[in-house]
Image (spheres, rainbow, N blue to C red):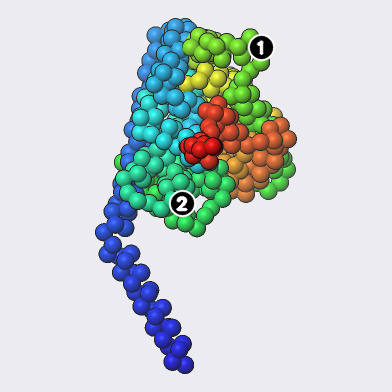
């Protein structure tokens, strides 16, 4: 009896000591303050990026008002300039930024290269310039890399544990970036778990949640409680209209898988003369991509430039004045923009492409509500691209403030993810991360360690 009482007393004593350490340790409070400050910095960068993107798209629309043929000059010169600056001064800033972040999680030898404040600042400026020139790119993927870079850089200022440094801070920065960029805190958490880490460790879960909360509060305080695509009350009755779930899920998965395969093929190198030009003359190739973008834009009535937010919102609200082939043209414009080698994400353009395909699907299924079909197509295509079904339907739900479509969207996302696997067996971002590591020719840390001199 006395032994058990002694053990219980010892446990209470250790618990009290641990509690006092947690509450009064200056080192722990320094870490917390740096971490919270980092989350605020991520949100601030995301907000600045969002405002800059709006201005860049607005300036491009002003150029189009002057002449719809002006992109034939602006896009080739602009994309060539962005590609040159990226390759010359900001290697590692190309493309979305999510593959680089995943690569940094997998291999610490590239971490300081792709998650530096210099790369983050270059990513913002060059992505905005690409939008100004009419590239079909988004800012959400870049914001993931920017958020991870900020948290990783601040983590160097204090002695975080190895696990927190390698996983927790990077994942938290990426999650906070998604939350602040989309104003979708739940999607930020889900994306970090489902796509970036593919698992949730107990040691990093609190770190991710705290970063998302802090970033979300600042975003809410400065930008207000807004939704990117407004509010829609669309719902799907439980009858034959559910055929739209199967059609949008399977069709979105097929198209999303095809899009993913095109991006993967581009990252690995296109065969033939086009691939040779892409490899040996990247600046001239970027200029050629700008010319193709201008041609697609002219053919689409100048609707395929930029992020695609406005076009997607018009389609969701049923006020669309877009060409019937908008979805396909936007998808091609996004592939060309990615192939040019400039910084820029595919999140927002993919949602716009899905909305465009939803417009076509709604015309083929008049028995289903228009708004519901569009949302299903957005989720289906986006899930087919990123192969993260939970993230796909959570993002669309939060971006439209519509909870009537939870079950249909979940079903469409799962069908699309499974269908996409038939077309593109490997997940897009994971494959692009592996390709990035292969191009970087990253040596194994054990192999690169200096060997002892041969004394024989």
Q: Is residue 422 depicted above or below 69 in this figure? A: below
Residue 407 in view: yes
Viewer-nearest of discs 1 and 2: 2
* Quarter-of-image position of residue 252: top right
Identify the residue position indicated by label 1 in the image.
272
User: Hey, which residue is sitting farthest bottom in the picture?
Assistant: 1
Q: Is residue 38 depicted above or below 65 in this figure? A: below
Residue at horizontal 43%, vertical 15%?
84
Give the camera-side residue of 446 and 369.
Answer: 446
> Residue 171: horizontal and vertical position, in percent?
46, 45
> Residue 308: horizontal and vertical position, in percent?
49, 26
Give the camera-side residue of 342 and 128.
Answer: 342
Residue at horizontal 35%, vertical 30%?
118
30 vs 97, left or right, is left
User: Hey, which residue is sitting farthest front in the picture?
Assistant: 456
Residue 163 circle label? 2
Q: Callout 1: few (<14), some (14-19), or many (20+) C-alpha neighbours within 10 Å?
A: few
Element class at badge 2: helix
Residue 71 in view: no
> Residue 453: horizontal and vertical position, in percent?
49, 37
Residue 433 circle label? none
């Amino acid at each position: 009896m006395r032994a058990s009482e002694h053990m219980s007393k010892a446990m209470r004593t250790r618990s009290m000591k641990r509690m006092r350490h947690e509450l009064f340790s200056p080192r722990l409070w320094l870490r917390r303050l740096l971490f919270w400050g980092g989350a605020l910095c991520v949100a601030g960068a995301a907000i600045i990026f969002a405002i800059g993107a709006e201005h860049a798209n607005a300036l491009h629309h002003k150029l189009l008002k002057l002449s719809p043929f002006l992109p034939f000059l602006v896009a080739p010169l602009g994309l060539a300039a962005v590609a040159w600056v990226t390759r010359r001064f900001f290697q590692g800033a190309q493309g979305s930024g999510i593959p680089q972040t995943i690569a940094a999680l997998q291999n610490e030898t590239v971490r300081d290269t792709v998650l530096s404040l210099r790369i983050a600042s270059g990513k913002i400026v060059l992505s905005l310039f690409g939008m100004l020139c009419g590239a079909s790119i988004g800012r959400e993927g870049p914001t993931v890399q920017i958020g991870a870079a900020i948290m990783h850089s601040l983590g160097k200022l204090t002695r975080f544990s190895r696990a927190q440094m390698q996983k927790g801070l990077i994942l938290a920065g990426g999650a906070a970036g998604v939350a602040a960029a989309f104003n979708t805190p739940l999607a930020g958490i889900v994306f970090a778990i489902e796509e970036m880490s593919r698992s949730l460790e107990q040691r990093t879960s609190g770190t991710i949640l705290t970063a998302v909360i802090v970033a979300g509060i600042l975003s809410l305080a400065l930008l207000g409680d807004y939704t990117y695509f407004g509010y829609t009350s669309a719902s799907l009755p439980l009858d034959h209209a559910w055929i739209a779930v199967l059609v949008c899920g399977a069709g979105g998965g097929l198209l999303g898988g095809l899009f993913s395969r095109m991006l993967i093929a581009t990252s690995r190198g296109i065969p033939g003369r086009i691939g040779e030009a892409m490899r040996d003359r990247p600046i001239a190739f970027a200029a050629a991509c700008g010319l193709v973008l201008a041609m697609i834009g002219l053919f689409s009535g100048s609707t395929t430039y930029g992020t695609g937010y406005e076009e997607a919102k018009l389609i969701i609200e049923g006020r669309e004045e877009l060409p019937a082939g908008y979805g396909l043209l936007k998808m091609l414009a996004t592939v060309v923009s990615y192939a040019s080698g400039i910084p820029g994400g595919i999140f927002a353009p993919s949602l716009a492409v899905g909305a465009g395909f939803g417009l076509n699907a709604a015309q083929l299924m008049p028995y289903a509500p228009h708004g519901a079909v569009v949302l299903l197509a957005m989720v289906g295509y986006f899930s087919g691209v990123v192969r993260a079904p939970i993230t796909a339907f959570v993002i669309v739900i939060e971006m439209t403030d519509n909870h009537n479509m939870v079950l249909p969207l979940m079903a469409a996302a799962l069908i699309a993810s499974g269908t996409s696997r038939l077309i593109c067996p490997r997940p897009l971002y994971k494959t692009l991360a592996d390709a990035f590591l292969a191009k970087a020719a990253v040596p194994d840390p054990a192999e690169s360690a200096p060997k002892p001199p041969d004394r024989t």
